[in-house]
Image: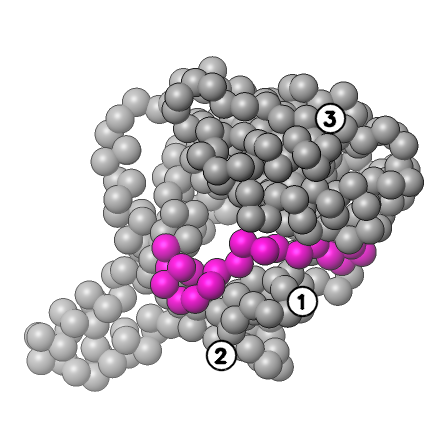
Amino acid sequence: MRFSIVIPAFNESAVIARCLDSVHRAARDMGPVDVWVVDNGSTDDTVAVARRAGAQVVENVTGRRKTIAALRNEGAARAGGDILAFLDADMLVPTNWLTAAAARYASGFGGILGFVGRTPDSAGLVARAWGDRLFRKRRTVMAVDYLPGRNMIMPASLFRALGGFDASLATVEDKDLTMRAVRAGYEVLSSPEAPVEHLGYESGFAEFVAKEYWRQGNTLAVLRKRGLTLRGLRNPLLSLFHLAMPLVALTFLLAGRPGTALVWGLLWPVPALVLSLRDVGREDPLFGMVFFLTFVRWIVAGVALLRQLPALFRPSARDDARGSD
């Protein structure tokens, strides 16, 4: 069993050496492992640092930025391993990262695997509440329908069968790929066996809002691609709910019906409360912060959804947009 590691990067000179060092330590007893850093036109020393750290580097010489999906596809196209491990440049992996994955695939597993992520101990309250919420919950191996692309492992044959990441998507390309795998009948597992550390955590509330706005930027594109399914509709419906509820409450208040306005106002945070209870549970010491951030996240998602509405009137992306850019 041979692993290939694919790491997209853009201006990651501050962290990529630590990432690659952790990868090399994890690969020490694994036989040949090829490591590919696919650079997106960095203006810092990312390329030089990656080469000094022993990675094979693919440079973007087109003069224009590519989607992270396209970068991952480029690395996968060059990889020689039968197992592909996708990692971001701001991730640190434990020494048992590859051995734990190898054991899982040796047992007959043939789907997509992701190890639970966490933030460093030095991270602030927002990062610990949001970035560690799944780490605090997922204490056993469990089936999921979504894994982040910064921490995703799969057989190369499965990656090719799925057609790789959709390079036309600027965000949520990882959710799109994992959901396609589930629909095709493959297992997608989240495991706590080898927790990975995310150095690119949100430094504060403002960065959390900015990142969530960016992450929600392809909601309608994915919905158009997958069609109207209950799972696909969840995100836009929750987003619209969180925008509509305060407007409904205000409408009743201006109409002289404060009691009705209060009822609608009290309904506003209910979905965020239910999702927070599902994610971490009421006993979690950071439950209050998780609830607040979940509530804010869906409001931000609603604003991002409004920005995408003009795309409904444009032609759908061509099928051949998938694959390497």
**Left or right: residue 105 compared with residue 250:** right
Q: Callout 1 environment at 10 Å: few (<14), some (14 to 19), or many (20+)?
A: some
Quadrant in the rendering for residue 128: bottom right
Task: Work out whether 257 lies above or below 8.
Answer: below
Q: Secondary structure at mark 1?
A: helix
In the image, farthest residue toward the left? 255
**How far apart in space, not on screen, are marks 1 and 2 (Cα)?**
15 Å
Tell me residue 202's x, y (percent). 48, 60
Report whether residue 229 is seen: no
Name which of mark 3 and mark 2 comes first in the sequence: 3
User: In the image, what residue type sits under mark 1?
Assistant: Lys
The residue depicted at 45 percent of the width and 40 percent of the height is: 171
Judge whether residue 15 can be spotted in this image: yes
Residue furthest out toward the bottom: 259
Q: Which residue is mark 1?
A: 137
Residue 89 percent coordinates (x, y): 60, 43
Q: Amino acid at mark 2?
A: Gly
User: What residue sits right under mark 2 in the picture?
Assistant: 288
What residue span does the magenta drawing correspond to?
185-210
Judged from the image, the secondary structure of the residue bearing numbered disc 2 is: helix
Number of on-image labels: 3
- How busy is the neighbourhood of tag 2: few (under 14 within 10 Å), some, or many (20 plus)? some
Q: Position of residue 74 (x, y in %)?
A: 59, 22
Q: Quadrant of residue 218?
A: top left
Residue pointed to by mark 3: 156
Tell whether position 193 is magenta: yes
Describe the element under mark 3 as helix, strand or loop.
helix
On the picture, is 307 further left or further right than 72?
Answer: left
Give whichever of 14, 28 is nearer the camera: 14
Mark 3–mark 2 Cα distance, whole angstroms, equals 41 Å
Kindly identify the residue that appears in the image at 8 percent across and 75 percent down. Answer: 255
Quadrant housing the N terminus: top right
